């Protein structure tokens, strides 16, 4: 449990405990040897009819390079890596590694050597052979990477090194060549720094709070390639092309362009700089790619409802290598199954069927692969295990609302599709959960000090990891599972008429335990929750009366109908999408205080869509996020359901309510959403306490709510565990291009 003693544990002790627990999870995790029937079904395509994975030549001969050293080359559709003097075809299967832990951020993404080493061991243990990083990492990452490979010379991990630049420049400058080539200069400087770093010859780069960080490990022999750039905003690409129309084609020593748009010329210049710098300074070359994503692919999607997601292309096929570049180009594309919307609505994709049924994801992969003459890797793919949902997929491969087991099954299926369609590899997004990330359909908030950051399970972006980061030093404050040990010794917050309510909190949830005078599902019960004092003194539908304004009403009504409701005046969804954005009709009654109306808690997932091919209209979409899910939320339980909100047994009910459902933006700082109408927008307040009661819904007495002294958390606690998806993916990766690892 997250006691105050544990919260102030020193960094050294915390690291040692983390290492020990992680090792136990890694080597004794019951999911490591998990045998999931879906893997066999995937490989035999459900009907016992096996699809043959590609079988490229396993080796190729060496080439004359004029004294330039190579560790990796591209040829035809695949990578060939130099292993024991031979050029062996290697299918790149692995993960994207993020830059942060729960209480670090991009301004100071400090992670220890020991943590990196543990991660690398676990990644390799999943039968992965490649790690992709988005940008320069902490020096300890490269030291751990080098040391890990020295310990396992026969099964090294390979690195795809990403390089980016200051993203804010894309909006502030707007043109890749604007403001006297500010972005171009920054990007070329970054690629040269990256080259020095992977060769272990850098002491001039800053990293977070490390000024002039020392990078002293040469890991170039493990670098499968560089991936330059990020998911380009279409406006940035289009503005560059428009502002620089008529730009002369680029002729460099290692890269040239042919019929390229200005944005592609920009990329070619950066790539040529990298190759030239590495060649001249280190007599070494590595494969290079330029990141792309489905939004700026080169395919015309005739049924894309949002024109901005298909308005411009980045065609890296216009960038050509010269005879002086021996390592070779490749393509890297991020492809997710739920976005852009053409993935769900392009008729030929929906009509594509394989032995598993309709498979628009694979159909798109097939189309995309035809666009390239070089090897292609899927640089990002995956689905998150968040409680919240941000996009829906025609295949059920949604952005959120996915259990850990289902995550493993979906990602395993996508992994196989990528290999079957002739790609050179795929990198799962992502290795670890990252708490700092924001999602478009949740209110954005970041604490002033990341050491106090909490987890928002309603934010899809925070739960992509195969390695979970959960609140609490060693375990969370509670798990709805029917085992009540964590409540031993706790005094009830409320106790009346045979009903007792207990509460506790951590970085992610409000936990409640109710002891009832009857079997829990014999009749419905209600738990009013007061937080801001802006709510109602009554709940009209249930004929309940309260002693103070109630903001939320928890209704316990069996496995299928237990839900959290919000007072209409404090309904965040209504205010954002009816009042502010005017997507839905307004109801003036909701904008008055103390109406006694309690609404379903909803979350928005899509604007109105009008489809070009037939004019079909799909109205804006939402779902009821306040509907609570019955199940066992304890990760150690055989029946573990990672999305479970409550569990009931006999006369007891345990619940965990995500802070965001209560309009709490930071459970550690007690930061909550304030009165929308007084502020005329989303604003915050801080320091309120919680008040609770619990009653049967047939009560006609005025219900007295009792205070709960909700304590701030000065230093967030967290622990890592391997999700159930880990074991499934371990098995899937073992069967994926097994002769090319």
Image: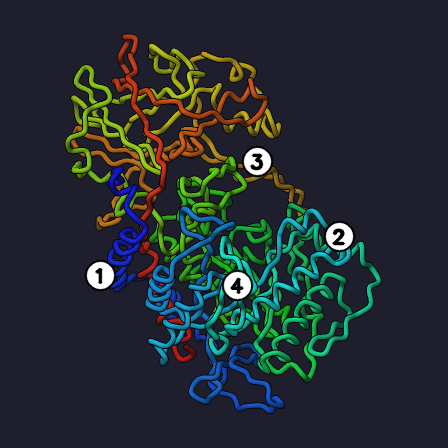
List the residue tagged with mark 1: 28
List the residue tagged with mark 3: 620
634 vs 198, left or right, is left
Give the Cα distance between marks 2 and 4. Answer: 25 Å
Q: Say which residue appears at 59% left-offset and 38% top-offset.
A: 607
Give the Cα distance between marks 1 and 3. Answer: 46 Å
Front tag of 3 and 4: 4
Quick check: 557 above or below 261? above
Who comes first in sequence, dot 4 or dot 1? 1
Classify mark 3: helix, strand or loop.
loop
Give the Cα distance between marks 2 and 3. Answer: 30 Å
Q: How many marks?
A: 4
Who comes first in sequence, dot 2 or dot 3? 2
Classify mark 2: helix, strand or loop.
helix
List the residue tagged with mark 2: 239
Which quadrant does the N terminus fall into? Answer: top left
Quick check: 353 above or below 79? above
Local packing at callout 1 (Cα closer than 10 Å; few below 14, some 14-19, many 20+) is few
Who comes first in sequence, dot 1 or dot 3? 1
Quick check: 322 above or below 46? below
Who comes first in sequence, dot 2 or dot 4? 2
Q: Say which residue appears at 29% left-offset and 48% top-offset.
A: 10
Local packing at callout 4 (Cα closer than 10 Å; few below 14, some 14-19, many 20+) is many
Q: Nearer the viewer, residue 279 or 84?
A: 279
Q: Say which residue appears at 44% left-offset and 84% top-offset.
A: 83
Classify mark 4: helix, strand or loop.
strand
Classify mark 1: helix, strand or loop.
helix
List the residue tagged with mark 4: 379
> Where residue 232 sits: x, y (%)?
64, 55
């Amino acid at each position: 449990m997250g006691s105050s003693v544990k919260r102030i544990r020193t960094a050294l002790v915390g690291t040692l405990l983390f290492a020990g627990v992680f090792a136990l999870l890694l080597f004794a995790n019951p999911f490591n040897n998990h045998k999931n029937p879906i893997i066999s079904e995937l490989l035999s395509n459900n009907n016992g009819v096996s699809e043959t994975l590609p079988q490229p030549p396993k080796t190729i001969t060496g080439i004359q390079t004029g004294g330039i050293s190579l560790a990796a080359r591209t040829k035809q559709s695949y990578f060939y890596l130099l292993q024991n003097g031979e050029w062996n075809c290697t299918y790149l299967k692995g993960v994207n590694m993020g830059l942060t832990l729960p209480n670090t951020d991009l301004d100071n993404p400090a992670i220890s050597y020991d943590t990196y080493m543990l991660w690398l061991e676990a990644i390799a243990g999943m039968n992965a052979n490649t790690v992709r990083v988005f940008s320069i990492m902490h020096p300890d990452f490269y030291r751990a990477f080098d040391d890990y490979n020295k310990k396992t010379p026969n099964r090294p991990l390979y690195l795809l090194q990403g390089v980016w630049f200051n993203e804010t420049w894309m909006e502030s400058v707007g043109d890749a060549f604007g403001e006297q080539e500010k972005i171009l200069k920054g990007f070329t400087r970054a690629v040269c720094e990256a080259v020095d770093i992977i060769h272990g010859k850098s002491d001039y780069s800053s990293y977070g709070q490390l000024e002039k960080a020392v990078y002293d490990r040469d890991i170039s022999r493990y670098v499968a390639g560089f991936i330059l750039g990020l998911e380009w905003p279409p406006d940035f690409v289009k503005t560059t092309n428009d502002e620089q129309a008529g730009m002369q084609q680029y002729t460099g020593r290692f890269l040239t362009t042919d019929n390229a748009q200005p944005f592609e010329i920009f990329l070619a210049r950066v790539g040529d700089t990298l190759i030239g710098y590495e060649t001249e300074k280190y007599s070494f070359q590595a494969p290079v790619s330029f990141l792309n994503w489905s939004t700026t692919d080169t395919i015309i999607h005739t049924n894309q409802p949002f024109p901005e997601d298909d308005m411009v292309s980045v065609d890296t096929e216009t960038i050509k290598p010269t005879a002086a570049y021996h390592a070779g180009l490749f393509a890297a594309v991020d492809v997710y199954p739920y976005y852009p919307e053409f993935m769900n609505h392009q008729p030929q994709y929906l009509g594509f069927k394989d032995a598993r049924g309709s498979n628009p994801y694979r159909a798109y992969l097939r189309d995309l692969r035809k666009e390239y003459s070089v090897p292609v890797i899927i640089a990002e793919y995956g689905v998150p295990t968040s409680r919240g949902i941000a996009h829906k997929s025609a295949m059920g491969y949604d952005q959120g609302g996915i259990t850990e087991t289902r995550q493993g099954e979906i990602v395993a299926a996508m992994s196989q599709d990528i290999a079957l369609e002739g790609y050179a590899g795929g990198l799962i997004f992502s290795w670890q959960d990252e708490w700092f990330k924001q999602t478009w359909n949740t209110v954005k908030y970041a604490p002033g000090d990341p050491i106090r950051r909490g987890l928002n399970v309603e934010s899809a972006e925070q739960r992509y990891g195969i390695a979970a980061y959960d609140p609490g030093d060693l375990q969370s404050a509670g798990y709805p599972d029917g085992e009540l040990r964590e409540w031993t010794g706790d005094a009830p917050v409320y106790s009346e008429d045979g009903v007792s309510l207990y509460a506790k909190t951590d970085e992610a949830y409000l936990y409640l335990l109710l002891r009832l005078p009857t079997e829990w599902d014999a009749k419905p019960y209600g738990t009013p929750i007061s937080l801001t004092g802006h709510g109602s003194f009554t709940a009209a539908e249930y004929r309940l009366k309260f002693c103070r304004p109630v903001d939320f009403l928890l209704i316990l009504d069996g496995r299928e109908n237990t839900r959290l409701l919000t007072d209409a005046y404090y309904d965040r969804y209504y205010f954002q999408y009816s009042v502010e954005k005017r997507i839905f009709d307004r109801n003036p009654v909701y904008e008055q205080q103390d109406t006694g109306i309690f609404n379903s808690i909803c979350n928005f997932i899509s604007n109105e869509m009008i489809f070009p091919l037939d004019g079909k209209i799909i109205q804006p979409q939402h779902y009821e996020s306040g509907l609570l899910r019955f199940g066992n939320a304890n990760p150690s339980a055989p029946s573990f359901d990672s999305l479970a909100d409550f569990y009931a047994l006999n006369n007891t009910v345990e619940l965990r309510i995500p802070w965001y459902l209560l309009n709490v933006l930071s459970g550690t700082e007690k930061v909550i959403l304030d009165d929308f109408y007084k502020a005329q927008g989303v604003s915050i307040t801080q320091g309120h306490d919680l008040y609770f009661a619990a009653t049967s819904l047939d009560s006609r007495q005025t219900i007295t709510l009792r205070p709960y002294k909700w304590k701030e958390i000065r230093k967030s606690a967290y622990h890592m565990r391997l999700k159930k998806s880990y074991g499934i993916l371990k098995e899937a990766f073992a069967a994926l291009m097994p002769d090319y690892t």
